[in-house]
């Protein structure tokens, strides 16, 4: 992000790939600063943190084509929320012994 300047158009492909959640939040803050300086971003991401940017236009690509979707309706948000809210049950389902 240090190489980015204001008033630019930036295309990012999964920038979260090597970032911890804290670093993703720092990246979100840096993106916001650049947006305030008239930059625009097109980001391909699976990160619920990056997807949460206020007023972002989120496009979902699937078998039905391309559609705009609300943040809370993204699969990434729903799966992450479900896991965090029910992690013990999800771990049991994922790691439990077969009967």
Image: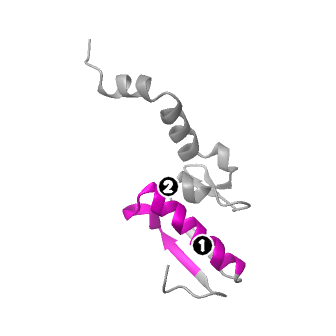
Q: Is residue 77 left or right of residue 7?
A: left
| Relative height, residue 14 to residue 83 (above, below) | below
List x then y, in percent, for residue 63.
55, 49
Q: Which residue is at the far top?
A: 99
Between 77 and 4, the one lying in front of the other is 4
| Relative height, residue 54 to residue 38 (above, below) | above
Between 27 and 42, the one lying in front of the other is 27
Check the picture and name the quadrant holding the C terminus: top left
Regarding mark 2 in the picture, which secondary structure is present there? loop
Number of residues whose C-alpha sits closer than 10 Å to that of mark 1, classed few (under 14), some (14–19) or many (20 or more): many
Q: Is residue 92 left or right of residue 16?
A: left
Regarding mark 1 in the picture, which secondary structure is present there? helix
Q: Residue at x 52, y 39 (%)?
A: 79
Q: Is residue 81 left or right of residue 56?
A: left
Q: Indicate the quadrant where residue 7 lies.
A: bottom right
Q: Which residue is at the far right?
A: 55
List x then y, in percent, for residue 55.
74, 61
Task: Specify whether residue 26 is painted magenta.
Answer: yes
| Relative height, residue 4 to residue 45 (above, below) | below
Between 74 and 88, the one lying in front of the other is 88
Q: Residue at x 57, y 65 (%)?
A: 28
Q: Which disc is residue 46 wearing? A: 2
List x then y, in percent, for residue 72.
66, 44
Q: Earlier in the sequence, mark 1 or mark 2?
A: 1
The residue segment tinted magenta is 10-36
Q: Is residue 8 left or right of residue 76?
A: right
Between 71 and 32, the one lying in front of the other is 32
Read off the residue under disc 1: 31
Q: CA distance from mark 1 to mark 2?
A: 16 Å
Task: Specify whether residue 60 is painted magenta.
Answer: no
List x then y, in percent, for residue 25.
53, 61
């Amino acid at each position: 992000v240090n190489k980015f300047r204001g008033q630019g158009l930036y295309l990012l492909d999964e920038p979260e790939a090597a970032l911890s959640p804290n670093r993703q939040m720092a990246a979100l803050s840096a993106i916001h600063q650049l947006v305030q300086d008239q930059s625009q971003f097109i980001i391909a991401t699976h990160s619920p943190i990056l997807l949460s940017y206020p007023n972002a236009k989120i496009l979902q690509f699937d078998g039905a084509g391309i559609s705009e979707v609300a943040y809370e309706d993204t699969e990434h948000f729903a799966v992450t929320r479900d896991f965090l809210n029910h992690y013990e049950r999800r771990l049991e389902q994922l790691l439990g012994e077969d009967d």
